[in-house]
Image: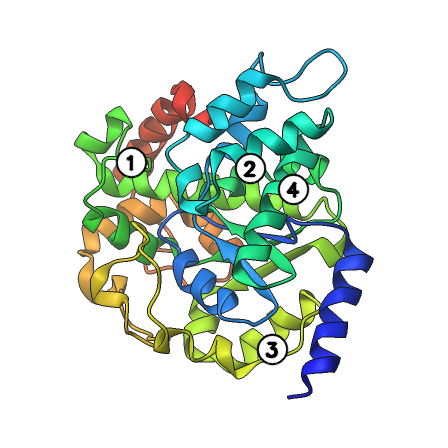
């Protein structure tokens, strides 16, 4: 590879498309975003941060901004104290200096933080992988109009299997009251809710800012899919993205230890063999329309009436839950 040409290409992309954050990797939790994060992060020109969670949450606070639109001292202190901020390994004093140097907007402050992260990683570009941001695309686009979004979509029935095995109480839908009664239907609703919101917001953006990637295609045709993704990101293809597993990853609570050394591997979840017929029917009664929209074949094109009635009740309960709005 011609290093000089590669470096020039990265600088041109950065100048043309704006500042960091360069890209957000989003998707319904348990859709494979950690795999995609590790692959893209292996590229020599871009670093992908650990999950942040704080970016849309802090700016939504009533005390986040002063009347002139600059960040408040309280926001800076809350940011430094946020448990996820520590993953960036940036000293709090560095952040305080950034905000003291001159009044800054929230977008500019975060950009400066990510520039520090880029410098520490020795790369010009930085992206963020936080699956939940699939529900915040509109806000993030408002803050950084040139940022790109990569929406990873996986068959919801396989996502459901992963949710059922995930030991954490968070992320949702394990928080919802309906989870104890019927986790499969709850997972189905949460999956379709995230996918719908992400696609709706993403399709309102210019085509060069929003990209959908199927998990199934990524794991069965990784080279082809990575080439297409890097083309969208205006980055040259590099073999490192396919050899991501060769390097020891930093501690990440979102990465299961048994997956650390695995290359791209298909078949880690298989709803056809691991879900009962009753579970599949319940899932499809809730999320069948989205499965159809995404061209995932249904096992039950016409669920029975009791399954549809049950799905309607679960859906109504979840749509009334205020936690689904976050």
Q: Earlier in the sequence, mark 3 or mark 2?
A: 2
Marks 1 and 4: which is nearer the front? 4
Residue 36 spot, x, y in % from top left: 46, 63
**Residue at the spot 29% in from the left edge and 40% down from the top edge:** 185
- The answer to whether residue 150 is visible is no
Disc 1: which residue:
170
Marks 1 and 2, how far apart at CA? 31 Å
Report crowding for label 4: few under 14, some 14 to 19, many 20 or more residues within 10 A (C-alpha).
Answer: some
User: Height in image: 294 above or below 101?
Assistant: below
Disc 2: which residue:
94
- The answer to whether residue 19 is visible is yes
Marks 3 and 2, how far apart at CA? 37 Å
Report crowding for label 3: few under 14, some 14 to 19, many 20 or more residues within 10 A (C-alpha).
Answer: some
Residue 4 spot, x, y in % from top left: 73, 81
Please tell me the numbered disc located at residue 112: 4
Q: Foreground residue, 185 or 249? A: 249
Q: Foreground residue, 41 or 162? A: 41
Disc 3: which residue:
227
Q: Earlier in the sequence, mark 3 or mark 1?
A: 1
Residue 100 spot, x, y in % from top left: 66, 26
User: Quadrant of the rendered structure where residue 262 is?
Assistant: bottom left
Marks 1 and 2: which is nearer the front? 2
Residue contact between numbered discs 2 and 4, judged by CB atoms under 8 Å:
no
* Label 3 secondary element: helix
């Amino acid at each position: 590879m011609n290093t000089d040409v590669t470096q020039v290409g990265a600088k041109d992309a950065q100048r043309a498309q704006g500042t960091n954050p360069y890209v957000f990797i989003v998707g319904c939790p348990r859709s494979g975003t950690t795999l995609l994060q590790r692959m893209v992060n292996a590229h020599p020109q871009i670093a992908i941060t650990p999950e942040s969670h704080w970016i849309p949450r802090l700016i939504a606070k009533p005390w986040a901004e002063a009347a002139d639109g600059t960040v408040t001292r309280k926001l800076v202190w809350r940011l430094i104290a946020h448990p996820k901020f520590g993953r960036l390994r940036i000293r709090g004093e560095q952040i305080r200096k950034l905000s003291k140097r001159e009044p800054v907007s929230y977008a500019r402050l975060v950009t400066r933080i990510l520039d520090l992260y880029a410098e520490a990683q020795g790369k010009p570009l930085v992206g963020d992988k936080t699956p939940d941001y699939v529900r915040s695309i509109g806000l993030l686009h408002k803050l950084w109009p040139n940022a790109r979004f990569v929406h990873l979509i996986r068959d919801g029935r396989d996502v459901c299997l992963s949710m059922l095995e995930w030991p954490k109480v968070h992320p949702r839908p394990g928080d919802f009251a309906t989870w104890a009664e019927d986790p499969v239907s709850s997972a189905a609703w949460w999956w379709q809710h995230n996918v719908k919101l992400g696609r709706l917001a993403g399709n309102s953006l210019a085509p060069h800012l929003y990209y959908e990637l199927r998990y199934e295609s990524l794991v069965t045709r990784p080279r082809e899919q990575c080439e297409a993704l890097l083309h969208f990101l205006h980055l040259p293809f590099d073999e490192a993205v396919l050899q991501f597993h060769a390097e020891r990853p930093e501690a990440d609570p979102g990465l299961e230890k048994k997956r650390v050394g695995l290359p791209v591997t298909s078949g880690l979840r298989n709803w056809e063999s691991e879900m009962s017929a009753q579970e599949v029917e319940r899932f499809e009664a809730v999320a069948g329309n989205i499965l159809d929209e995404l061209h995932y074949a249904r096992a039950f094109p016409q669920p029975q009436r009791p399954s549809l009635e049950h799905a309607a009740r679960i859906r109504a309960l979840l749509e009334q839950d205020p936690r689904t709005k976050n």
